[in-house]
Amino acid sequence: MLCLDNTSNGRLRNSDFAIVTNNAQAENSSAEIVYNSGNGNLYYNQNNEDAGFGDGGLFAKLIGSPDNLSAADLRVVDV
């Protein structure tokens, strides 16, 4: 399980999670948390709809690129 704080961009929602298969899709995703199942990269997308990640970006690499990662594996917590 990964725990994320909710102070980065107001309030992160547990449902705002996307799985993509390459970095180009990750950069164009509108989700705040984006997982690239092709390489295990986990991104924070600060600017949502705009291309790129804004002030966000890669924050974790999951070894083995698990195929079964879902929003249920992430928890948003207050710090």
Image (tube, grey):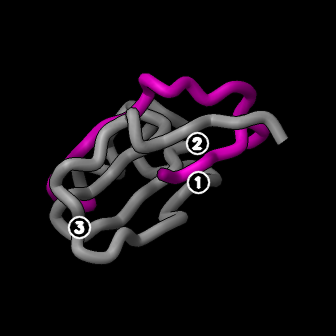
View extreme (bottom): residue = 63
Mark number, residue 46 = 2
Residue that mark 1 sits on: 56
Residue that mark 3 sits on: 65
The amino acid type of the residue labelled 2 equals: Gln
The amino acid type of the residue labelled 3 equals: Ser
The amino acid type of the residue labelled 1 equals: Gly
Instruction: Specify whether 19 is left or right of 31.
Output: left
Q: What residue is rendered at 48% in x and 33% in y? A: 48
Residue 50: quarter of image: top left
Quick check: marks 2 and 1 in contact, CB under 8 Å? yes
Task: Identify the magenta region.
Answer: 1-23
Closer-to-camera residue (27/68) = 68
User: What percent of the width, then of the height, locates residue 56?
Assistant: 59, 54
Quick check: marks 2 and 3 in contact, CB under 8 Å? no
Closer-to-camera residue (16/30) = 16
Q: What residue is rendered at 44% in x and 51% in y? A: 52
User: What percent of the width, then of the height, locates residue 68?
Assistant: 20, 49
Quick check: marks 1 and 3 in contact, CB under 8 Å? no
- The CA distance from mark 2 to mark 1 is 5 Å
